[in-house]
Structures are given as C-alpha cells and as structure tokens.
Image (cartoon, rainbow, N blue to C red):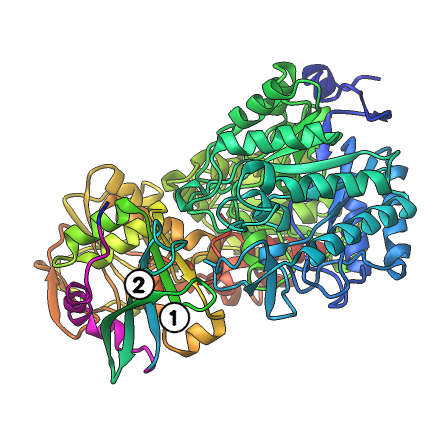
Amino acid sequence: MTPLPPPSRWQRLLDRHSTLFGELDDGCRIGIARRADVNQPGAAMVVWEAVGGRLVAGDRPFPGYRDAGVDVLLVGDDEAMTAISGELEGDALPVLKRLVRQGNLVCYVLKRQCELLEAGYEDVLQSMGVAFAGACR
Amino acid sequence: MTRPGEAKLKTLFQPAEWAGLKIKNRVKYGACCVSNYNTRDGFITPRELARTRVIAETGCGIITNQGAYPDPLGEGKAYFRQVAIFDDKFLPQFEMIARMIKDNGGIAIQQILHAGRYGGIDLGYCIQPSIVPQTLPHFRAPREITKDQIRETIRQHAEAARRSIKAGFDGTEITSFMGYLLATFNSKFTNQRSDEYGGSLENRGRFMRELIDGIKQATPDHPLVVRLNGAELMDKWGGNSEDECFELMQQAADCGVDMISVTVGWQEAPESSIGRDIQPGHWNYLAARAKALLPDVPIAFGQRLPNPAMADQCLSDGIFDFWEVCRPLLADPKMLHKAAEDRMDEVRRCVGSLNCLSRLFRDLPYTCTMNPALGHEVEPEYSITPAAVKKTIMVVGAGPAGMECALTAAQRGHTVTVYDKGDRIGGALVGYASNDMANRDDMLSVLGYYEAVAKRLGVEVKLNTAVDPKLMRELLHVYDVVVVATGARLDRAQLPPIADGVEVLSAVEVACGRGEAKGRVVILGGGKIGLTLAESLATRKMDVTIVEADKRLAGDVMPSWKWRHTAWVDELGIPSVTGAKAVKIDRDGVHVIDGKGIARVLPADTIIAASPAVPAQDLVHALEWMVDEVHPCGDAITPRGLGAAIQDGYRLGCRI
C-alpha cells in the first residue's frame, strides 16, 4: 500500500502552481487522505491551507468527514496514491485530474457551491476535473 | 384494426397483464425527470397539468407520474419546484392527473421520491444514512438520519402511497435511481452505519425491505414498483458492485414487489450512463441479468434504449417485460403512435444532449432541445393552430431553424418553400453531426427527420439555390413572407491581422467538407464547434492545437456536456492554449499571447477559425422593401445553438 506522501513533497507541487492557487482566500483548506484510512481511528490527512496568498502543506489527523475542517477533501484509493506519489515532483495536476475522472480519487466538497465560488475555488476545482454545476451524465 | 407498425413491432404493442391489471402494450412511461414546473410549496400547476395531458396521450400502457416528495419538511425535496404529496391538500391535482392517464387507457402509477442525498434543497442540509460529503457542490451538506427519522420516513412513504391510491392511481413506485435516499441506504458508498441499517448487504437492504413492507401494508391491493440500480457506477468510489446490486434486487423481490425497474448510475457517478456518448443498447445486459435472476418478477428497463424496434426485439428475446421510456417521449410525445403507423422516420429522436438535466441543475424548469413545445403546452402561443390568413412563405436556409419554421408553418396551412445554397438539408448541423465524437447517428437523425416530414407535408426544398436580391427581384410578389434562417458566419473582421497569401478556413466549412485541413492545424476558438472539429481531426491522427480567448474551453457547451469535451481533449492529447489572444497570423503560424502574457508562435499548415461568429442577416435588410414580411430566425438573430434554433423556428412558425 502506498503511503500518503508527506507535506514536504506536496509543498513543491503547490509552489509550482502558485498562480492557480493564488485566488484562494486565506484560510481555505484542501485535505487529502487515503480511502483505506478514512474510516480508521487516527487516520492521517495532508492539508493544503491558504496563507498569505500561497498554499502551505501540513498534516493533521483526519477526525471523520463531519469534523474534517477542510473545504474540499480528496480521498484516493491505492492506485491513486501510487500514481500521485510517482508524479509529485513532475506535473501532478493533470494526474490528479485524470484520477478524479477515472474515479480513483473522489473529490468531496464540504462547503456549498456559493461559498466555494466566493472563496476562489472555481479554477482550482476545474483544474482537478470537478464539474461545478452538477455532472448529470 | 392492426396498424402497419403494430404488425411489425408485435411484442411491443402486445397487451399484457400485470398485478391483475390489463395493460394495452408493453411500454411504461418512466418518471425520468422532475419537471420543475410547479409551485415552490409543492402544488401542481396548470403548466404541469398541460404537460401531463400530453404524456397521458403518448399511448403508453403504464404511465408513471413524476416523483413527489413525501415529507412536510422537504428533506426529500430535490428540486425547487418539485411536487409534494405529504398532505391531502395536494390531492385535487393528483386526481386530475390519474384521471387523464386512465381516460387515455393507461395504468397510472405515482412515484414517491425522497431524494435523500440530493434533497433538502430549501433547507441547507440533506439526510442520508451516514455523513459522507457531497461530491457535487450543487447539493446540500449531509446529516445522519436517526432511527426515529427512519421510522417516520417509512410512515411518510406509506401515507404518500395511500394518498396516491386515494387520488385514483393504480399503484406506486419508489426509486433508488441516481443516488436518492433508498440508494444511499443500499450503497456502501453512503451507508457506513454500524447499526442494523448498515454494514452487511442484509443490513443495508433493511431500509428498502421495511419501506416496501410499509407501503405494501398501506396499499395491499395495489402494485408497487421499485427502481433499483443494476449498476451504480460508483464501485470505484467504494459503492456497490454489480453483484451487490443484484443481491439487493433479490431482497426486493423476496419482499413481494410487483415490478423492478432496472436503472444505471448515480448523478455523481464518475462514468456516463445516459448521455449520447453511450451507445444505444449498451446497458441491456443488466436487464437480461435481472430477468435471468428473477424470472417471475416483471422487469422494466429502458436506459439508453431509445428505439422502439430495439425495444421490441428485447421484449421478444425476453430480456425484459416492459420497455421503460421517458426522454424519447419528451423529445417526441407522438413517438409510439408514429411507431404504430410505421412512420419512425418522422420521429424526433432524443439526441441525448441532456439539456433537460442541465436545466434542472441550474434550478430551471426542464425543456428539450428537440421538442420546443415541452413545458409550454399550457401556452396557446406554442400550439400549432390553423393560420387565419394562408400565406406563401420562403424560408432561406435549411438548417434546424429554417426547417423547424417551415414544417410548423406548413402544418398551419401555409405554403412553404425552403431554399438553401447547400446540397442537403441541415445547414451547419451537417458539419457538427458529421464530426460528433459521441454518436453521429443521433445528430444525423435530426436531418433525416426534417427530410421525412418535409416530404410528408409537401414542403418544397430547393437545394443548391442561393437567395439574393437578384433572385428575389425575379420572384417579386411570389412570396408573402421571407424567413431568413441563414445561420451565423465567421466574423473575419475580428480575426487578427493575416499576412498576404495565408488562408484562414472557417470551421463550419471544414466540418462540412468544403475545406480541407492538412499538416499541423491550429483552431481558433475552443467552443463547441472548434472542439468538435478538433476532436474529429485528432481522431484522424492530425496534429491539432486549440487557441481559446476564454480561460477555459467549452464555454458555450451545455453544462452536462462540458466535462465530456474536456475529457476528450485530454484523452486525445489535444494541446490547448487558453486565456490567449491571437495577435497575428502569418506563414510561421499563429502568434499568440498566452494566459501568462507570454508571446508564442504556434506553427500551422492549416489555420481554422471557429469563432467569433456573427449573425448572417444581410438578407433581412436586403429584402426589407421587396416582401411584405421579413423575419430573421435562429442564429441569424444571434448565434447560439441547436436548441435555440429549433425554439426560434418553431415559435416563428406558430406565429406567422
């Protein structure tokens, strides 16, 4: 099983895409967790938090969906974690998008659409392949 | 007397018996969409009644009325203008609907729809078995349903069923389609409870079994239909496998349900289920599996199965017992009658654009790309009535706007001639349909429909005939009315400066085969025309790059279809430069300033412009003083798309 990559590796990705994430309001948080962990006590989560116009990666325990304390939560299966881990130093955003499309990475939204739009999430979620107004396929 | 189509589609039109009820054929109208035509507090409106009258007249043996939410709080309410059935105060309109269906020889079923995860639209929260957050931001934050609330929800469903029967319906239906409350209990994805309602499949199915039992006890002499997923398409997210879906069907059958309607997918599923990109018949194997598993339980099915002939074959082969059909009957409510008369070439096919769902997800009433009258049945302005003054009409342009206007006007008694400079009916749609990645046959069927109906109505179509003031002078006083449906054209004045000797082709010309792309191709414009052409060229292994001024592709594409184009662009590896301004075109290619302000040259052997477009309305002014009435129509008013062209053409045809 591929572990969740540590915050230091995510930070390099975030810094490379600082323009994309620059529109997020301070305090915006995106969490990343492994599907195998989310129902286990003491599960780990990496959190990207908007601070002063940039995203800062850190880690914290995952307390369950209700109290996750993030706006958006990406939960990946093992295939997703392997693919992301292998690409974090490269161009990982298209990989995230592909994994969301393929269903290996579920993108949960814990805030309402209007709140996310207000907080500057539109481009970020679009870049991850999340349909903003409902996929209804 | 047996009509010719009935003789051909013998099984489809064969009477049947179900739950002690005699049914005139094997077609069940499915409650596929909530219309959103009703009041904010759940009352059925005259608009809804008028639409339902049309549905009642479709000729289906069983007609399911759209889902009504059963709880006074509105936790089950999914759409702003959904109908409610939690109180007797709603009964008078339900009684009218049941009567309409029965007066037309149908069996009336009322669907009770608690939307669960997709509900609580007015409340700011939704209820589901466990707190699993939404994946679509449109929906409300979840709360976990308590055991007391489960009992109350079952009681409300039973009351709603009793009320439906009181209103005159023959039976009721509950649905786990698309991720509604029942589905969220059944699915591992949303049911993570640790009590007797969660965990094992037996426990997850407990809510369904209790719900069925509650309704059966409340309405013991009336059939109950359950819609259940044959595939959730959520298994990658931790949802149910197909095997688990069928085990749940077995549980429902063991509880004594009277029919299982097999469905596919959730609204948020990461795969397509009902769009045009799914080939007709793709999901039939799920119905076949259900029938094999439950030979004694009537099975209804129709997902992405839009064709009566295909349905007849499935019925003959014993794949299912009733063809469940909805969207094709939204597109053409007379489809079954035309099938019975062997006039299938005159059917307006559902092209799977999902305009209906796109509208619902914007909290708008649903409408149909192909059927301009859907949702407007109550308005006399949308009725085809005999014209008070019979006129001679020239329609310029045989695209959807022009043909729609011509056919509508002809039905009102006008004499109509259509002129087009091209060699076939269809206008720009020919190019779009010929390059459509999803299902060319669907789009080309629109052209076939216009050809067939024009022939039946005696509308003369003069192809390869350009209309200009010179021709009009020869035809002075021949026509009372000219309809200018000449579409849109590329606005070359807005293109960047083009060096001498460099040609820029129009996307429509290339799409229609009047221009040829060679070598490295750069397409200016990443809207639906540019994307469709780029995708088509890329599948022919051509090197294509898209330049789009907006920061995202597919800006003019329907919300439910945007993801499909952007996914194709990724899958085909088509590079795109967005937020870009094309500043110059020369022999080196297209010079752009990209979204980051960096100047780049995109080398090109062929440059194609898909935008900007302007209305081709020169004739409106040129003919103004030569004919009594001149009307622009469709994209010749302002460039939009197929749905708007059909709307414009139809409305003008009703009005002239």
Q: Point out residue B175 in the picture as x, y percentages from the top left corner.
A: 66, 43
Callout 1: residue from which chain? A
List the single residue furthest toward the bottom. Answer: A52
Q: Find numbered disc 2 in the image and state the secondary structure of the residue it sits on.
A: strand
Q: Quadrant of residue B317?
A: top right
Q: Does residue B517 sit above or below B566 in this rendering? A: above
- In depth, the one of B142 and B97 nearer the eye is B142
Does the magenta run of residues contain A41?
no
Distance between mark 1 and mark 2 Cα atoms: 10 Å
Disc 2 designates what residue? A45
Q: Is residue B359 visible?
A: yes
Q: Does residue A8 sit above or below B162 in this rendering? A: below
Residues in magenta, as a range: A3-26
Q: Quadrant of residue B16?
A: top right
Of labels 1 and 2, earlier in sequence is 2
Task: Give the quadrant of the C terminus of chain B.
Answer: bottom right
Does the magenta run of residues contain A21?
yes
- In depth, the one of B16 and A36 nearer the eye is A36
* Residue that appears at 61% across and 45% down: B196
Q: Is residue B534 visible?
A: no
In the rendered structure, which amino acid carries the disc numbered 2? Answer: Met
The reply to whether the C-beta atoms of the residues labelled 1 and 2 are less than 8 Å apart is yes
Q: Point out residue B225 in the picture as x, y percentages from the top left corner.
A: 73, 36
Task: Give the quadrant of the N terminus of chain B.
Answer: top right
Label count reads 2
Callout 2: residue from which chain? A
Disc 1 designates what residue? A70
